[in-house]
Image (spheres, grey):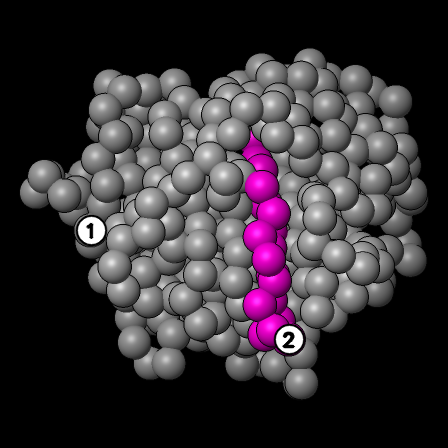
């Protein structure tokens, strides 16, 4: 497929296809390197199914988490606005504002979400609010040539881009307001999103400062493992990645990732490696037709050259009981 450029118009909403699982989604995250406070938010408009998937996840120090998940009714794909969460374009491909005003379940341990029914019935509901501005540190890039995800157009997204960001604003959990000033990532995707389509994917992100970090991505779909994509940011210079190898360690059942080593090959031929250790984990899941796709959303601390970086990493796996499909490969 020829490269498709990323255009300012792509920052706005796209005309849905007739695919029943058409999805247009935007995702934002943030990690505070000093406290371990983190944030993951997403709206996925599935207009042909009549709802938006809304995820608001706050990682709290000590392993706690505040979580809100909704399938909010929608009748069109005109905006990212549902269940109290909204994303507003300030300047296309440069600046976005994300706001939320609602409630969340306050979990004693993020991994309590492995059993959502028990977690939600046994956890208090608290007010949750935030207002955050995301400003790109570099121009957005795709996971391949131009917009999109190489080899995943039929199952994950036709169009896709992402970027590291400076994040400023505030977040308030149960009346405790915290100023936010730090780093994170954002992305925007549109096209079919079939959670049970890929056997697995890995999205490993890290930022050490405004000029140094990386994203490593690989997936397996229909028995085909992608070579991997992403980017390396060194001293403010962005190099796209054309090959990724990930070696992960896992704990006992249900086999959550505990550490990872990532090796990336850039377009210029450089090889860059980083090793990470997981210090927080909240497992999400999607169920359809008897199949379970688990997304272990973990916070990790990385050794990157002579720097220390932090990031949110996503381990998506089809599950066979307690065994994630990609455990032996990545």
- The quarter in which the N terminus is drawn is bottom left
Predominant secondary structure, magenta span: loop
The residue indicated by pointer 1 is 242
Mark 2–mark 1 CB contact (< 8 Å)? no
Q: Secondary structure at mark 2?
A: loop
Q: Where 26 falls versus 121 (above or below)?
A: above
Q: Residue at x 23, y 24 (%)?
A: 237
Q: Select label 2 or label 1 by which is in front.
A: 2
Q: Where 137 falls versus 29 (above or below)?
A: above
Outermost residue to the bottom: 290
Residue nearer the viewer, 68 or 328:
68
Mark 1 packing: few (<14 Cα in 10 Å), some, or many (20+)? many
Disc 2 or 1, which lies upstream in sequence?
A: 2
Q: Residue at x 33, y 67 (%)?
A: 151
* Number of dots carrying numbers: 2
The residue indicated by pointer 2 is 20
Span shown in magenta: 12-37
Q: Is residue 263 in view?
A: no
């Amino acid at each position: 497929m020829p490269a498709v450029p990323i255009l300012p118009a792509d920052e706005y909403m796209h005309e849905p296809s007739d695919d029943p699982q058409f999805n247009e989604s935007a995702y934002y995250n943030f990690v505070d390197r000093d406290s371990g406070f983190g944030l993951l938010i997403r709206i996925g408009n599935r207009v042909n199914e009549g709802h938006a998937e809304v995820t608001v996840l706050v990682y709290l120090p000590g392993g706690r988490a505040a979580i809100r998940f909704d399938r909010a009714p929608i009748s069109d794909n005109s905006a990212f606005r549902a269940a109290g969460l909204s994303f507003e374009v300030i300047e296309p491909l440069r600046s976005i504002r994300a706001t939320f005003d609602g409630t969340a379940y306050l979990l004693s341990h993020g991994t309590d979400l492995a059993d959502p029914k028990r977690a939600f019935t046994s956890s208090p509901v608290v007010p949750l609010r935030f207002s955050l501005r995301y400003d790109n540190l570099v121009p957005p890039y795709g996971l391949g040539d131009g917009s999109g995800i190489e080899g995943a157009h039929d199952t994950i997204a036709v169009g896709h881009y992402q970027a590291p960001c400076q994040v400023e604003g505030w977040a308030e959990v149960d009346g405790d307001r915290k100023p936010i000033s730090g780093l994170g990532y954002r992305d925007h995707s549109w096209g079919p999103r079939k959670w049970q389509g890929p056997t697995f994917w890995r999205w490993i992100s890290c930022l050490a400062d405004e000029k140094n970090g990386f994203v490593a991505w690989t997936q397996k779909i229909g028995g085909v493992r992608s070579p991997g994509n992403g980017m390396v940011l060194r001293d403010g210079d962005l190099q796209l990645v054309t090959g990724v190898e990930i070696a992960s360690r896992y704990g006992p059942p249900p086999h959550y990732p505990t550490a990872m080593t990532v090796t990336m090959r850039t377009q210029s031929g450089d090889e860059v490696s980083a090793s990470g250790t997981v210090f927080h984990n909240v497992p999400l899941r999607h169920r359809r037709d008897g199949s379970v796709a688990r997304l272990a959303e973990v916070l990790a601390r990385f050794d990157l050259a002579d720097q220390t970086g932090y990031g949110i990493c996503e381990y998506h796996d089809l599950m066979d009981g307690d065994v994630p499909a990609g455990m032996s490969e990545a």
